[in-house]
Amino acid sequence: MTALLLANARRAGRFDGLVDVALDGGRVVAVVPAGERSAAGLPSGPPPETVDLDGRVLIPGLWDAHTHLTQWALVRHRLDVSEATSPAHAAALVRARVHGATTPVPQGQPLVGYGFRWAGWDTEPTAAHLDEAVGDVPVILLSGDLHSAWASSAGLRYLGIAYHPTGLLREEEWMPASPRIVAVDDDVADELVADAARAAAERGVVGVVDFEVADNLAVWRRRLARGWGGLRVRAAVWEQYLDAVLAAGLTDGDPLTDGAGLVTQGPLKVISDGSLNTLTAFCFDEYAGLAGDGAHGILNIATDQLVPLMSRARDGGLRCAIHAIGDRANSLALDAFAASAARGSIEHAQLLRPDDVARFAALGVTASVQPEHAMDDRDIAEELWPDRTARAFPLADLRRAGVRLTLGSDAPVAPLDPWAAVAAAVTRSRDGREPWHPEQSLDLRTALEASVDGRSLDLDAGGPADLAVLDVDPLSVDPDGLREMPVAGTLVAGEWTHRTF
């Protein structure tokens, strides 16, 4: 890693003059007033390369605290049906792709699409809708929340399902079948993930937490052996692969291979309930219009199973990341953190009771939230959680309670773009709509600080040289423009991963 001097930089929200920022050994070693380079603290030897930022703004690089990186890489090349408003509309999009594309669907392979949100449709999707559109072509569409899939009759056969009454596979019906389409050849996956990482760098991203449902220890060791670079990754572990991580003696933050610090061990991931759009998030109250079994959603793992699993991870030096969306699932997840004394996060935390907001703070549990989901889910939340949406995505309540917040996308559920997450957190709006529960919005500095992995926007010396160079000060722009924030450059460990100037 060569020494580098970033000259004439501005710091976000600061009006006390330009600074020179010295990088060496992958770290920020000095931040001094511009021109005072003799005080920059650089080691003796040849003068460093100097890059004049010419007044551009320098901030810590952005992190996405919740991704499924391989799935995001695949989705970037799949049919998008997220705008569909009905089964017929979605089927028409599929028909247009099958019959109108210049590149046909490969023989024997399914057409895979993503993004449909059926809970708000007047009619439930069925295999017949797709069969009418494309006949015997195997079609498999992934829901926007990844908790369900919709298949044609040929698509069901491709998944190894001889018969299904509707073709809409939910939760445990879908998860065992999903590897048939979420897995691709290693060479293809690695190339697509590298391409997705380059695209992330163009948005100022320096790191992600990867919750891909896979043997992430093996996957990321393979990618490191092939020369992975350009993006830091914290690779989560799932229960079925926990033994290998513990046997390797890996604890939270350890590099997965000697001397390769870009990819480190992440938390144990457990899914405790489902999702709002699949009507499976586990809630204290019934979903509007539902009664009987399943009207409150689904609990995927009982507390008496979750606690020993989390305790095992804690004993092995790992943090825990517990998926919980419904308010009852969140309450039970907090019970499990208390009983196990584990450290970590609740992923999503979409619907919370006030007492549980306080328990997040008391237990030191991080709320890892995806503000863009609030924009995706606002209408269906009003329909399915009536009289409860004031405590849905309660970001301001969590902040006031002193809870540590981290922002993410859950890509591919939302695009891997922290600027979109920051914009949603601050404006509680998208596409010109009125803000949704604006009382739960975050101020801009808080949202940005929740997106830079706990670092200060003041950019003090001593941190990693993971930085983003911006053409404008993000703390001075109209929040509605954050989604189009221009990123002039990105550095990881002092090396450029994106540069336009």
Image (cartoon, rainbow, N blue to C red):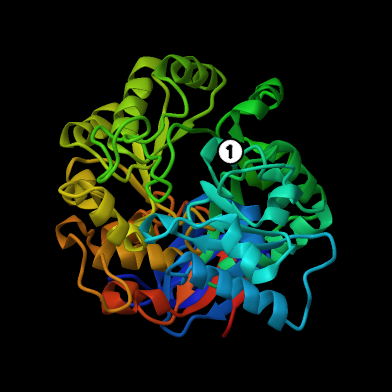
Query: Can residue 38 be spotted in the picture?
Result: no
Where's the C terminus, which quadrant? bottom right
Disc 1 crowd, CA 10 A, few/some/many (<14, 14-19, 20+): some
Drawn side of residue 377 relative to residue 301, left or right: left
* Point 42% across, 69% down: residue: 85
Q: Does 380 appear above or below 339? A: below
* Point 18% across, 40% down: residue: 401
* Point 19% across, 55% down: residue: 440
Q: Does 266 appear above or below 378? A: above
Q: Looking at the picture, how far across and down is residue 27, in whole percent?
A: 55, 55
Residue 422 location, quadrant:
bottom left
Q: What residue is disc 1 on?
A: 173
Residue 111 location, quadrant:
bottom right
Query: Can residue 483 be spotted in the picture?
Result: yes
| Amino acid at circle 1 | Glu
Task: Label 1, secondary structure: give it.
Answer: helix
Where's the N terminus, which quadrant? bottom right
Q: Looking at the picture, how far across and down is residue 149, in whole percent?
A: 57, 51
Q: Looking at the picture, how far across and down is residue 350, in whole percent?
A: 32, 46
Q: Does 384 appear above or below 53? A: above
* Point 65% across, 61% down: residue: 73
Name the foreground residue: 115 vs 314: 115
Q: Looking at the picture, how far across and down is residue 343, in whole percent?
A: 41, 28
